[in-house]
Amino acid sequence: MSTATKPNHIGRKISRIRELKDMKQEALAQALGTNQQAVSIMENSETIEEEKLVEVAKALGVTVEAIKNFSEEGVFNYFNTFNETVSGSNFGPQSTCNFNPLDKVIELYERLIQAEKELVQAEREKVELLKGK
């Protein structure tokens, strides 16, 4: 198995999100205050320091969780669902899409992560209340 196909290869996830956002390595490098070669090395790295990941997420306009939880399968599932919805509706082949579906995928991941965070916080609050009784 090559490292690029490992499900938790953070560098590859960064690379795919960057590509989905139609961003070149040079643009990401500039946002990070580094050079294209450093971005290339990072994208080939299986793991990345948390501090660096925070910087990269900010530069890509996504959350750290969105990067960590990104999967090709999720993108394909989203498009399959999107295509089924479009073909089963009143949209014809000439219909135009007024938004970037890839942005919607990332937005969906971020909303999912936020919902999970809120659920965890609610559970923590319940535990604290129970401890106090």
Image (cartoon, grey):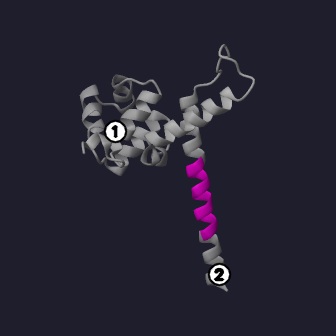
Q: Secondary structure at mark 1?
A: helix
Q: Amino acid at mark 1?
A: Arg
Residue at the outermost right position? 90
Question: Going by the image, does 36 lie left or right of 60?
Answer: left
Dot 2 amino acid type: Leu
State the count of labels. Answer: 2
Name above or below for residue 103 compared with residue 11. above
Above or below, comparing residue 61 to residue 54 in the picture: above
Please tell me in which quadrant of the rendered image residue 108 appears.
top right
Q: Disc 1 designates what residue? A: 12
- Residue 15 screen position, x and y as percent: 36, 34
Q: Chief secondary structure of the magenta span?
A: helix
- 124 inside magenta stretch: no
Look at discs 1 and 2 and give the one toward the viewer.
Answer: 1
Q: Which residue is mark 2?
A: 130
Question: Of 61 and 115, which appears nearest the observer?
Answer: 115
**Label 1 crowding class (10 Å Cα cut-off): few <14, some 14-19, many 20+?**
many
Q: Earlier in the sequence, mark 1 or mark 2?
A: 1
Image coordinates of residue 67 in percent, x first then y, are: 44, 44
The magenta stretch spans which residues?
112-123
* Rendered image: mark on residue 101: none
Residue at 63 percent of width and 71 percent of height: 125
Q: Position of residue 105 (x, y in %)?
A: 55, 37
Q: Quarter of the image for the C terminus: give it.
A: bottom right
Q: Choose between 45 and 60: the one closer to the eye.
A: 45
**CA distance separating discs 1 and 2:** 43 Å
Is residue 62 in view from this perspective? no
State which quarter of the image contains the N terminus.
Answer: top left
